[in-house]
Amino acid sequence: MEFRLLGTVAVETYTGPLPLGPAKRRSLLAALLLSANTPVSVGRLTESLWDDTPPSQARGVIQGHVSRLRALLVGADAEAYGVELATLGDAYVLRAPETLVDAQRFEELLMLAREQRSPGDTVLMLKEALSLWQGPALSGAFAGPPLKAAAHSLEESRLATVELLARTYGTLGEYHRAAALLSAETAAHPLRESLAAELMLALYRAGRQSEALDRFHRTRRLLADELGIDPGPKLADAYALILRGDPGPPAAAPAARARVPSRPAAPSAAPAAASPASTGADAAPVAGPPPAAGDTAGAPPAVRRPPSSAQPAVHPADPLPVDLLPRAPRGFQGRTAELAALTRAAAGESPVCLVTGPAGVGKTALALQWAHRNEALFPDGRLFADLRGFSEAGEPALIDVLREFLLALGVPPRRVPESAPAAAALFRSLTGRRRLLVVLDNARDSATVRALLPGGTDCVTLVTSRHRLEGLIASDAARPVPLDTLEADDGTALLAGVLGEERVLAEPVAARRLAELCGGLPLALRVTAARLAGRPQWTLAALADELADERGRLAFLDVDDTGVAAALRLTVQHLPPDAVHQFARLGHHPGGHVDPYAAAALAGTDPVAAAAALERLAAAHLVSETAPGRWVLHDLVRLYARGLDPAAAREALVGVLDHGIATALAAADTAEPGGEPCFVLPDGFRRPAAVRDFSDRAEAMRWLSAERENLALAAQAARDAGLEDRAWRIILLQWPQVVWRVRDNWTPLLELALESARAGKDAYAESRVLTLLGWVLTEEGRAAEAAALLEHSPRLAREAGDLLGEATALINLAVVRAELGELPAATENCARAVELARREEDRHTEMLALQHLARMRLTARRPEEALAHARTALDLGPEHEEAARRSLLLAICGEAHLALGQEDDGVRLLDRAAREAEDAGYDEGAVRALEVLVRTTADPSYRVRHERSALRLATAP
């Protein structure tokens, strides 16, 4: 159990986060955790839950929240962790070990960091402390005055830690790392002088004097414009030091690095990916099933981006080291010669190391072992991708692998090129002056590997494959490191590593025979050793006899990899029934990884039982936990598991598909609350025993992003199994992620949804998919294709009786027609959408249609009509989720007043639109309003605000 305050207020348990519910209950928990092990009075809790006059029944509300929170903790076995929520008179106390509260661990790590003698150790402590932060402190809670003060205090502590880490990097001579760290924080806190001063000094000492001086002048202007003050002592002193050419304090000798002296990273001149031309509309068409998609504050990508001149370069400056490596393999034994061969192969310029060998021989384990042992050789980070070249799930798209690499290297999502060749070129450019390790696991062919090779001469690429990839050897001088089955001595060493040397030395002949019967395959040996480890009374000789008999039978049946199959079969025979059941169902999972929720859906159990079964299977080396709560099966193990209960394939598939639908529904509802439900549930829907709880939009979006590949594989499996009603639903439910990352190659997945909808002869589904697909094509600059598709969507929606779907389709069609210059037809479509929304009494869709209609009237030089439509739309709101739309409507009103010659009213409304967008964190709306203000007035503050909003927008994750 773990309590989180440094980010979303949450309680993490073995089976996932507790469903805490409303914000006030999270506020209550936060208030108790901030004073953990100390009684907190009802009065203090009241101040935390309400920032104005509390209701008369406040005490009863608090008691209800306490009761529910206590029940959640008890249900999660809190007592076993020493956690108790107790009542003490007129107060409550949450008793918990300090090690369970992330804020307490953060302070402890800071204290430890200050006590370290070595700057390198200090850096490690500070980085670990900062890694506890997962977002702004106390997110997801209702912030009454005490909680606001606490969140501010925690943030101040975090910023002070960032500054300390930067100074420690400077002590080590790692000025480029200090600059990279401080650049991100300075962008978020441009008025914090201490950050700006530290950044100036880091840039100066990294040899970037002009950038350091530019930082000073920008900060000075910002302080004058925003606060009317001059730079303080810290900033002024840093400026004076740079002008004097003061070398500053001597740095400690930097840590040793691999092969050649380090070189400063050079800024790239590669151009940004092109954005579609602006059409003058406020927003792109509606993104998806709910009419709100694409224009809410939670989905800014649907609004037109600022001009490219306002956006920074694609290339991030000196990002912190990245690490995508899975965990190091446990119980790794032997392979001394192969590890040494890898080290030799990794020497030289731009080496490509190629580990080859049969399935189950331990190629991935060897690669990861070497990568983790040699971390110090790669100060700029380590990338990893499973290319799934030999998996039934199919290989990932090349652009998806490149996108993950580019995002890890600090490229903002909207700046990732759409085509694989362009993304590969950007990847090579970004890695040109870095020391990176790139691990490409399970490669099938040389062409895929070539596209993923980094550009730097100091980068190392480590490839594993069952094929020899002779083309890669010929074209890129790849250095092969063949991996054969383990020799008997190494096999017995692996057994000894798991069982202990005494047990192996007691039966050396039997141990050697076991190694031979397992075919020298580490996978089979680990399964066998895990089985023996839990049974100390068993002899190695008895198991060897049993394995010999089993292997002989499987060989007679012509089963592939009989060493592995025999070991698996004997292990499974001795598992408890619930673990066997779970294992068999895992074989039918269409995706690459499972969590306890998905495992439960496959097996028809609950997440607690599924997690326990997964732990049991992990102990038997049948599954591996690659990250907390994320489990995978080796390809050979998956094939074996699938054969245990082939008749259950469809039942398991339906279970996991319906789990995906239920969880994606919960994620979409949390990410975009208030939107219209996409659809009714499919016939025969199997509701999961438990559905993951999402505390806020960020968590829901993280899940949609992490599960994108699994959901795509599930949709394809549904289509292949004739479950079209599940396939299109799973795809459409990802609409918040489509909206957020629209230029992220969604078209193939949406085309699969369209095939599924048409195969099921479902007009409702076909219309909804066409509406979303048409919008995505519009954003990709394919307006003519989008229009051809969208023309069919309103008619299909009418046939299905889906009036709101028809309105949504008409709005999307209107925007693409406006982009094609067909303004009269576009205006007519928007007007029809307004009528439909009013008939259905859906204010959200009506507001959206009026917004687009107003913009089109403004484009047609009809400012009076535009003003009337915008005011009508504003009268329908505002609601909290309409913050983005309200900003856009206010901007239209402002522009209409300017067109009517009423400059004062126009500037006032545009300033209001910009401020409301800024307050809501809606940078796209702020950029649009401020662009007009910059063109209209000479007030320099508008330009400063525009630059800040454009920077946040371009660098947003």
Image (spheres, rainbow, N blue to C red):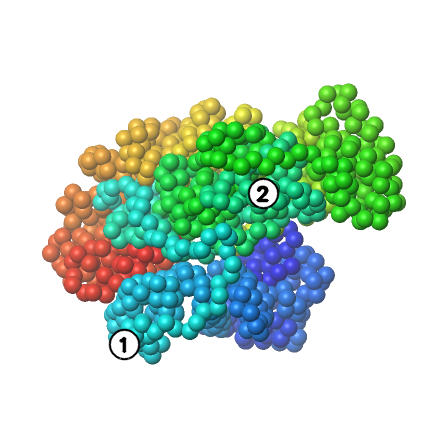
Kindly identify the residue that appears in the image at 37 percent across and 66 percent down: 205
Residue reaching furthest to the left? 901
Q: Secondary structure at mark 1?
A: loop
Q: Which mark is residue 718?
A: none
Q: Amino acid at mark 2?
A: Leu
Q: Secondary structure at mark 2?
A: helix
The quarter of the picture where residue 773 lies is top left
> Residue 794's x, y, as percent?
33, 31
Q: Which residue is mark 1?
A: 230
Q: Is residue 939 above or below residue 408?
A: below
> Residue 136's x, y, as percent?
47, 62
Kindly identify the residue that appears in the image at 40 percent across and 34 percent down: 747
* Frontmost residue, 30 versus 390: 390
Q: Is residue 591 left or right of residue 214?
A: right
Q: Is residue 803 visible?
A: no
Q: Which residue is mark 2?
A: 342
> Residue 751's x, y, as percent?
42, 30
Q: Is residue 149 visible?
A: yes
Q: Is residue 729 above or below residue 149?
A: above
Distance between the alpha carbons at the discs numbered 1 and 2: 58 Å
Q: Amino acid at mark 1?
A: Asp
Q: Is residue 67 left or right of residue 644?
A: left
The quarter of the picture where residue 824 lies is top left
Q: Is residue 392 left or right of residue 449?
A: right
Kindly identify the residue that appears in the image at 39 percent across and 73 percent down: 248
> Residue 466's x, y, as percent?
59, 31
First in sequence: mark 1 vs mark 2? 1
Q: Residues within 10 Å of mark 2 (few under 14, many from 20)?
A: many
